[in-house]
Amino acid sequence: MMWNSYDGRNWWGMGGAHGVVFWIFVIAGVVALAVWIANPARHRETDSHFSQTALDVLKMRYARGEIGREEFEEKRRDLQT
């Protein structure tokens, strides 16, 4: 009887079940990697960038000087009603 001999079944000498489990893990890993790469949420800069309110945008435009005080006040009143 030879205990440590290679009998051609697989690397571990334990039969085909381990080979099937191995390939299931390999395929699951490839699928998980593909889903992670294709996830559109991963490509966004930050979530806070997309959660700004209209009033926040208006304040930023006023701070950059894109609109004057009168226009800012008028649009702020419109947004708050």
Image: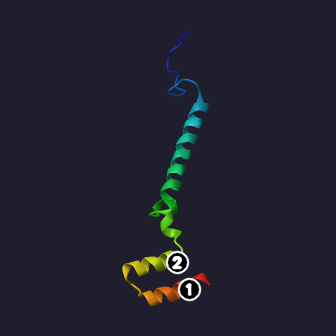
Which residue is located at x 54 percent, y 74 percent?
53
Indicate left or right for 46 with 22 as reference.
Answer: left
Tell me, for residue 8, which label it has, or none: none
Q: Amino acid at mark 2?
A: Leu
Is residue 8 positioned above or below 55 on the image?
above
* Closer mark to the observer between disc 2 and disc 1: 1
Mark 1: which secondary structure? helix
* Residue labelled with disc 2: 55
* Residue labelled with disc 1: 77
Q: Whole-percent x and y of residue 28?
A: 56, 46
Which residue is located at x 51 percent, y 89 percent?
74
Which is nearer the eye, 12 or 71? 71
Mark 2: which secondary structure? helix
Which residue is located at x 52 percent, y 28 percent?
10
Dot 2 surroundings within 10 Å: few (below 14), some, or many (20 or more)? some
Q: Amino acid at mark 1?
A: Arg
Q: Whole-percent x and y of residue 32?
A: 54, 50
Which is nearer the eye, 39 or 70? 70
Position of the N terminus, as image quadrant, is top right
Alpha-carbon span between mark 2 and mark 1: 10 Å
Q: Whole-percent x and y of residue 19?
A: 56, 34
Which is nearer the eye, 47 or 5? 47
Which residue is located at x 58 percent, y 24 percent?
14
Dot 1 surroundings within 10 Å: few (below 14), some, or many (20 or more)? few
Position of the C terminus, as image quadrant, is bottom right
**Residues marked 2 and 1 touching at CB (< 8 Å):** no
Is residue 76 positioned above or below 26 on the image?
below
